[in-house]
Image (cartoon, helix red, strand yellow):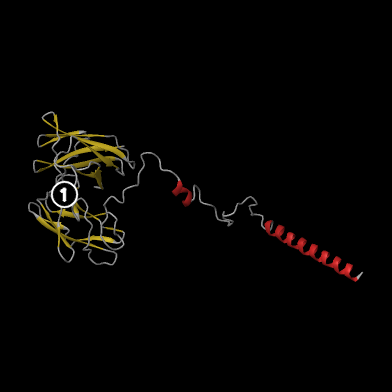
Amino acid sequence: MSARMSSARRRTLAATVCSAALAGVLAACGSSSHADHTSMPGMSHSDSAMPAGPSPATTSAMPSMPGMGPMPAGDGLSESDGGYRMASRTARVMAGMATSYRFTISGPDGKPVTSFAVDQTKKLHFYAIRSDLTGFQHLHPAMAADGTWMAPLGNLQPGKWRLFASFAPDSGSGKGKDFVLSRTLTVAGNASATPLPKAASKVTVDGYTVTVQGELMAGMAHDLTVSFAKNGKPVTDLQPYLDTYAHLTAFHAGDQAFAHLHPQTTVNGDHGGPDLPFHAELPTSGDWRLFLQFRTAGTLHTAALTLHVS
């Protein structure tokens, strides 16, 4: 009898404990009037609203749309980016004379950078353009041991200029990254703006006819084809220039935003042309002034034309 009573008490106690536990679980689930009984594991139970759209993990897994590529790193309209800074003591020069423009590129530690990666055969590409997109100069300055660069600018016409430095550090936090920084320069004198030529797909320079084919839309990657002809015949003797058969730089009308269009042709001796494909991705709509540099018979030519981006 005592054994049977002990067994019964144990069964009663176990049942009581299970009932209490179940009641606790049910109470916890229904303790708040804001509780979402349909919430799945991993979803927030806080009162704050969930962000709209896919989660970062979902976004990274989503396929990109055709024609969309990564946006350019920047438009070059700042003197600093990612801790790197372009500095110069020269802010104003006189018109009508050559200028040796000195500047430095400092890193996140504030010290001048002296180690740069080679890009298209050069450690730094330097560009000058006036506010009306005239006077284009593309230079490759020399760097002193202390990190000071010296760009031999030619005769600059009066007005507001922007000077760009395109480079990739070969050490530090910016190693492997492309940067384009710029500073403004005032050239003293009476400035007279030149109207931007209308958009056109064809231009003639030094006897060469350069034709650009391709419809561009802002922020989207498109193919652009540049064709060369002379005296009505296709040109097939383009020579390498900066490890390619043509170098194409673009500036946006109004703010001088910078873009570099990358060629996709493999160099094979002095046999470039007549058609060169480019990967083109211009971030902003409007008119862009394109400067195409190419070499034939040892002479460098620069063709300029206006391209409209929708």
- Please give left or right for residue 73 compared with residue 63 in the image: left
Query: In what quadrant of the picture does the C terminus appear?
Result: top left
Picture quarter containing residue 274? Answer: top left
Residue at 71% over, 59% down: 27
Q: Is residue 148 visible?
A: yes
Residue at 63% over, 50% down: 38
243 is higher (above) or lower (below) than 206: below
The foreground one among 11 and 170 is 11
Instruction: Residue 263: give x, y in percent of width and height.
Output: 24, 43
Q: Is residue 89 visible?
A: no
Instruction: Residue 269: give x, y in percent of width and height.
Output: 15, 42
The residue carrying mark 1 is 138
The foreground one among 137 and 125 is 125
- Please give left or right for residue 223 compared with residue 274 in the image: right
Instruction: Residue 214: give x, y in percent of width and height.
Output: 27, 34
Amino acid at pointer 1:
His
